[in-house]
């Protein structure tokens, strides 16, 4: 008899869906979105609906392997767990004896599970004194900025959005990267809401909105400050809310009135002043208004400042008091999980250095004192996703670097491994999930037995620790025990409840209004810090301002002359970062690597539709097929990402051109702050 198991989508996406997996004779035969989950709404996205094709894929790694060919070539021989772990233990112990900081963990969002993500692995690296990894590749610019303003990352309750009357989708491609928000937006539209998309590209989301504002990349802070200008100029702010709940609003008012008029901001953003005026008027006049900003707009040199400026708009209008009003970047801190219990930062030896993952190329090729001699990669595919790929590969090619990769598949990164270890997928292990686009806590039950000899990440680190002679009990704790402890302080939800129900809404009032009048916030002042005491203490501008892109006429005119086109490489609809590129159905849906370019820009370069083009700058180059399109604004080109280089014609992808430079706030990646030139290949 088939049975149905409640599972959770593990992927790095705000939606964190509830999934129902049907299992027959030990094999998963069907996967579907949970129809009862209020956010999942009974459907899975294009990608995850193919999760069974991915799980039972021919390319699944089923046994440990040891490299036999050159690094990058991808030839291995099968080994036993015993042999593979002995080799790793011996190498890591030898490096540790000299300096444990020569060991670098490298992980990111392969799974967002609290257990198979960062629990035992973190304890292990903390215990041995490895270098710390600052996990900046996606979201730290925005997270740091939001927290400076509000003290805690929460936002508008997703389930109230249908009540909104104006929805601004700002730097987010909702239908691709956050599709389970759309049914709420559709309901709001049916109730008369207006939708506006702010994106340099006319995405499928922009098509589905009432209005599209094609902003020049990297200039959103200026646009937000122009909206603030109009709100103050026209006396459309909520004075009571500002006085009660915020700090420093008068200083912001003085700055925006003096410096951010729609006329001046039009020159920065290339958005007509009349469009800025009408956007600001609409925002001033419509309650409740909701802004969905996601992480796309902060991948620029001034990305932190952009999130900061946008984040405070609902504080100017008092929208935080209204169901359906406010803004959402992330809800992840609404979950009071005990991450210190899971990760044990108390085990970190004092003085341990931190390496910014965005600067992996530099860390592997230039860092001394001590150099990185071993890298252990799990839940990530840096040879495809990290910026400045040629530097990253130069590092991974080093003969004196010992590389271990825990994976489902033989990715580009796996090709550089000395030892390659097979990990289980979400259907084969248990896990606990918070979310960053809603407030349901979820439990993933294992649906099937591990395929081949694969093991959960946690089990691999347990075995490795034992093999290295580390006898600490915290390196042997079971997954279930860690889950029980992690949720101990979540009010009103027990492990038994989670096991029974699969997903549970946090016990907060409905609607959840996290910054309503009267709330004391965990900032130094207890208020929304328009004037930020944290930033002032760090020597940053205490009041929000516009910081131009690193690679722009304003900051690097000579570079802008040589490389006049701004390249954005946002997620392809059928991929999840580099995950799913090897799933045949989804790769067919994506077609091939393309570059969208405006007709005028293409003409000037003699480029015709379908031509193979080379996209290059001083860091490197890649090729793609030209698509001539008015969906990109003149001066902007777009390369949907993130392709597995080894599955393209010339083994390249957009990250040959992206930079290791980091954002103004939070040390985040700047993938979309990237000037290039394009020529026929
Ligand atoms: N299908 C799919 N879904 C995904 C992912 C995926 O790879 N594929 N990735 C997941 C992950 S890890 C993340 S972090 C999120 C990412 O999803 P989002 O946070 O939505 O971010 P992006 O998709 O990177 O960018 C969103 C939009 O921002 C636009 N953009 C770029 N620069 C600017 C700018 O300067 N200003 C403005 N206003 N817009 C700009 C891009 O053109 C793009 O359409 O999605 C998650 N969901
Ligand atoms: N040019 C460009 N580059 C980008 C982006 C972009 O938009 N443009 N987006 C950036 C963003 S937002 C992000 S978040 C990063 C994402 O970068 P990554 O976090 O590296 O994400 P993925 O590319 O999805 O690779 C995750 C890998 O983890 C593996 N994995 C999944 N589950 C498990 C598990 O349980 N155990 C183990 N051991 N492995 C597992 C998967 O098989 C997959 O190969 O990429 C960034 N890079
Ligand atoms: Mo991300």
Image: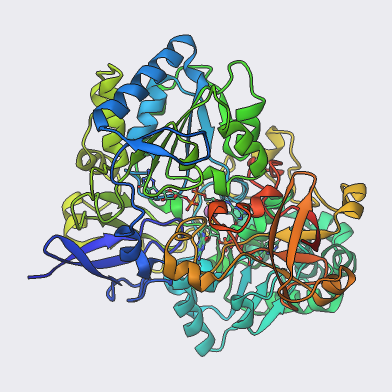
Which of the 4 image quarters holds residue 653?
A: bottom right
Which of the 4 image quarters holds residue 325?
A: bottom right
Which residue lies most toward the left here? 1
Residue 571, percent from left and from top:
57, 62
Q: Is residue 348 left or right of residue 258?
A: left
Seen from the viewer's position, the closer of residues 655 and 494 is: 655
Residue 443 appears in the rendering = yes
> Please, is residue 590 above or below residue 576 in the view?
below
Residue 633, percent from left and from top:
78, 72
Residue 681, percent from left and from top:
77, 61
Residue 522 appears in the rendering = no
Residue 108, percent from left and from top:
47, 44
> Please, is residue 641 above or below residue 479 in the view?
below
Q: Which residue is drawn at 79% across and 73% down?
A: 598
Q: Which residue is drawn at 57% across and 49% down?
A: 385
Seen from the viewer's position, the closer of residues 534 and 397 is: 397
Q: Residue at x 73, y 43 (%)?
A: 542
Question: For the N terminus, which image quadrant?
Answer: bottom left
Which residue lies most toward the top here? 98
Q: Is residue 630 left or right of residue 71?
A: right
Seen from the viewer's position, the closer of residues 326 and 85 is: 85
Counting every numbered tag in the picture gives 0
Seen from the viewer's position, the closer of residues 265 and 401 is: 401
> Please, is residue 112 above or below residue 601 in the view?
above
Which of the 4 image quarters holds residue 626?
A: bottom right
Q: In this view, does 380 lie to the left or right of 495?
A: right
> Please, is residue 51 above or below residue 414 in the view?
below
Q: Is residue 616 left or right of residue 51?
A: right
């Amino acid at each position: 008899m088939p049975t149905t198991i409640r599972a959770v989508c593990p992927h790095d996406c705000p939606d964190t869906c509830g999934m129902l997996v049907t299992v027959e004779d030990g094999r998963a035969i069907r996967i579907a979105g949970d129809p009862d989950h209020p956010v999942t709404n009974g459907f899975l996205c294009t990608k995850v609906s193919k999760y069974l094709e991915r799980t039972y894929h021919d390319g699944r790694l089923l046994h440990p392997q040891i490299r036999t060919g050159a690094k990058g070539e991808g030839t291995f021989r099968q080994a036993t767990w015993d042999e593979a772990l002995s080799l790793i233990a011996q190498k890591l112990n030898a490096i540790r004896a000299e300096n444990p900081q020569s060991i670098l963990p490298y992980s990111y969002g392969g799974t967002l599970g609290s257990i198979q993500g960062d629990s035992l692995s973190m304890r292990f690296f903390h215990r041995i004194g490895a270098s710390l990894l600052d996990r900046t590749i996606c979201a730290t610019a925005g997270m740091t900025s939001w927290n400076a303003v509000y003290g805690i990352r929460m936002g508008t309750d997703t389930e109230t959005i249908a009540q909104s009357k104006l929805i601004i989708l700002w730097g987010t491609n909702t239908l691709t990267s956050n599709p389970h928000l759309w049914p709420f937006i559709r309901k709001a539209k049916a109730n008369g809401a207006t939708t506006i998309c702010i994106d340099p590209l006319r995405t499928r989301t922009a098509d589905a909105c009432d209005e599209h504002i094609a902003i020049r990349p990297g200039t959103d802070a200026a646009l937000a400050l122009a909206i603030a200008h109009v709100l103050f100029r026209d006396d459309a702010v909520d004075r009571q809310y500002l006085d009660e709940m915020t700090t420093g609003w008068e200083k912001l008012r003085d700055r925006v009135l003096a410096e951010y008029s729609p006329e001046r901001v039009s020159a920065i953003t290339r958005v007509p002043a009349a469009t800025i005026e009408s956007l600001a008027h609409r925002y001033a006049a419509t309650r409740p208004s909701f802004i969905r900003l996601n992480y796309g707009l902060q991948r620029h040199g001034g990305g932190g400042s952009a999130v900061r400026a946008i984040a405070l708009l609902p504080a100017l209008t008092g929208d935080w008091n209204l169901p359906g009003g406010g803004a959402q970047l992330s809800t992840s801190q609404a979950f009071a999980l005990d991450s210190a219990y899971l990760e044990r930062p108390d085990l970190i030896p004092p003085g341990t250095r931190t390496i910014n993952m965005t600067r992996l190329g530099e860390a592997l090729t230039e860092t001394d004192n001590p150099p990185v001699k071993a890298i252990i990669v799990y839940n990530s595919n840096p040879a495809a996703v990290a910026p400045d790929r040629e530097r990253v590969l130069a590092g991974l090619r080093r003969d004196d670097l010992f590389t271990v990769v825990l994976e489902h598949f033989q990715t580009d990164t796996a090709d550089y491994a000395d030892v390659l270890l097979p990990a289980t997928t979400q259907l084969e292990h248990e896990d606990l999930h918070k979310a960053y686009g809603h407030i349901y806590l979820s439990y993933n039950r294992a649906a099937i037995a591990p395929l081949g000899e694969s093991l959960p990440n946690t089990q691999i680190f347990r075995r490795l620790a034992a093999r290295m002679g580390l006898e600490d009990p915290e390196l042997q704790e079971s997954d279930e025990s860690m889950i029980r402890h992690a949720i101990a302080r979540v009010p009103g939800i027990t492990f038994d409840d989670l096991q029974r129900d699969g997903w549970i809404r946090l016990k907060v009032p409905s609607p959840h209004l996290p910054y309503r009048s009267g709330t004391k916030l965990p900032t130094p002042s207890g208020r929304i810090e328009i004037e930020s005491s944290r930033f002032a203490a760090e020597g940053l501008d205490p009041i929000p301002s516009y910081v131009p892109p690193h690679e722009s006429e304003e900051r690097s005119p000579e570079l802008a002359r040589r490389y006049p086109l701004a390249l954005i490489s946002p997620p392809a609809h059928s991929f999840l970062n580099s995950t799913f590129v090897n799933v045949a159905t989804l790769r067919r849906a994506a077609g091939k690597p393309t570059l969208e370019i405006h007709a005028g820009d293409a003409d000037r370069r003699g480029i015709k539709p379908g031509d193979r083009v080379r996209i290059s700058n001083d860091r490197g180059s890649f090729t793609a097929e030209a698509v001539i399109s008015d969906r990109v604004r003149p001066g902007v080109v777009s390369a949907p990402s993130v392709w597995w280089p080894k599955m393209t014609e010339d083994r390249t992808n957009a990250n040959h051109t992206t930079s290791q430079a980091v954002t103004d706030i939070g040390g985040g990646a700047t993938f979309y702050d990237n000037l290039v030139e394009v020529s026929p290949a």
